[in-house]
Image: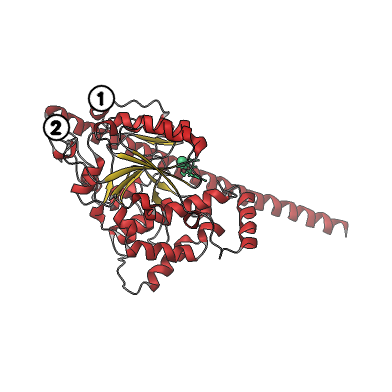
Amino acid sequence: MVTKSKYLRKVSKYLLFISCLIFSSRYIYFCLLNYSILYKEFNLEKEYYNESNNTLHRYDNIRRRNLRHGLKISSSSYHDNILDEDYEYVNKSSNKVNAVLLMLVRNWELPYALKSMRSLEDRFNHDYQYDWVFLNDVPFDDAFIEATTLMASGETKYALIPSSDWDKPDWIDDDYFEERLNEMERQNIIYGNSKSYRNMCRFNSGFFFRQKILNQYDYYFRVEPDVEYFCDFPYDPFQVMSQQKKKYGFVMTLVEYESTIPTLWKTVRDYIKQDKKQTIDTDSELYQFITDWNDIRTPRSRVESTDRYNMCHFWSNFEIGDLNFFRSDEYIRFFDYLDSSGGFYYERWGDAPVHSIAAMLLLKESEIIHFDEIGYLHAPYFTIPQSNYFQLKHRCICDQLEESRIDFSGISCLTRWWKHGPGKKFMRETYQL
Ligand SMILES: Nc1nc2c(ncn2[C@@H]2O[C@H](COP(=O)(O)OP(=O)(O)OP(=O)(O)O)[C@@H](O)[C@H]2O)c(=O)[nH]1
Ligand SMILES: [Mg+2]
């Protein structure tokens, strides 16, 4: 009896030893595999970063040789001549467009509003004197009106947003709404428990362009408090928009927090399905931009092609847009459909993914422009034209840490835009896309 149990103990010891060996070797293999993937990705990232720098400096040299042929604009290639000194986009007075600088802002944000205004006036508007329009859900106070009027080179106008365009609609279920706010707070979602943030996002998605004070304008440039523009503008972006028939312009593109929009994509897909006019082309390059999970930094396919939203959007704290696009029946139908699902309140849908998805579904590729000659900071991220020559010529000053530069970071969608958007032909040629 004793010898048998001894024998059993011995066998189980061996079994334990062998299974430990198998388990640990698997574990080590798994660690090594992960390490090698991470190492390869890190190197790939570095490689593309260097490659991109080299390419840009190669073009710097071409530009230095021929200063009359200034800088490219992002819509095509580095060989565009559109920024010649005497080119019409740089005409400061006669080609002024029917456009407005637009800021939604609270009274207490006055110092930050002034900071943004000073920067934009110095870098762009003092040469053009476009009007400023300020919107608020409560009346602006005298101090705000006085200081912003003195800071602006153009006329300033102020409007109170009607409660029907700002406040939570009656059909939102209050109990469920409270439940969702608490739940999102528990999950530590940024602005997850804020009611006013939701009003703001819904207003910016569906109502800003309906404000009466904007009726007289065709284009807007959204400005937020506490942002900065790093370089002199090399052109009037409104003239670029109007002459090239652009409807949406951006400077940064990155991925959205998925937890703020769990059902947004499903709602968009439902919208597409029920769209009786069947005008939305899901084979377009723009649709690929928001559903492709690979970019030019990942040449080998990591994720099979899907119809899932990849979270890419244009960061809407900077946007230059055609108000008539947002006023169109197509956009309003799209917004109303999303709004009726309650997602602006039960979740925390941002205006950035809503504007961006609408642009991808309703605009043509040629109607969107990446203004990559504009240096811009909205904390925590910034972007600045890469070319050293540009930075010198346009008096750029950027004191930010390199880590905050968005364009080549892991969360940026810019390289995906280069793959599917209309710009950067040279990149596509390099990578044979
Ligand atoms: N009038 C008014 N403006 C608001 C309100 N909430 C936000 N805004 C404005 O809406 C814009 C976006 O709000 P932000 O707080 O900057 O939101 P964000 O850019 O997502 O986040 P951070 O800038 O990182 O805080 C800014 O221009 C704000 O001034 C509000 O309750 N009332
Ligand atoms: Mg902001």
Asked whether the viewer can see residue 262, the reply is no
Q: In the image, is 56 to the left or to the right of 194? A: left
**What residue is drawn where x is 45% and y is 61%?**
265
Distance CA(mark 1)–CA(mark 2): 16 Å
State the residue position of label 2.
85
Q: In the image, is 1 to the left or to the right of 62? A: right
Could you tell me residue 369's position as x and y percent? 27, 47
Q: Between residue 383 and residue 208, name the one nearer to us.
A: 208
Question: How many circles with numbers are drawn on the protein?
Answer: 2
Could you tell me residue 290's position as x and y percent? 37, 56
* Label annotation for residue 178: none
Mark 1 surroundings: few (<14), some (14-19) or many (≥20) residues within 10 A: few
**What residue is drawn where x is 31% and y is 34%?**
50
Mark 2 surroundings: few (<14), some (14-19) or many (≥20) residues within 10 A: some
**What residue is drawn where x is 41% and y is 68%?**
271
State the residue position of label 1.
392
Could you tell me residue 60's position as x and y percent? 20, 30
Going by the numbered disc 2, the residue's amino acid type is Glu
Q: Secondary structure at mark 1?
A: helix
Asked whether the viewer can see residue 354, the reply is yes
Marks 1 and 2 close (CB-CB < 8 Å): no
> In the displayed structure, would residue 191 be above or below residue 341?
above
Could you tell me residue 368's position as x and y percent? 27, 51
Q: Earlier in the sequence, mark 1 or mark 2?
A: 2
Q: Quadrant of the N terminus?
A: bottom right
Q: Secondary structure at mark 2?
A: loop
Residue farthest to the front, as pictured: 142
Location of residue 235 (image quadrant): top left
Going by the numbered disc 1, the residue's amino acid type is Leu
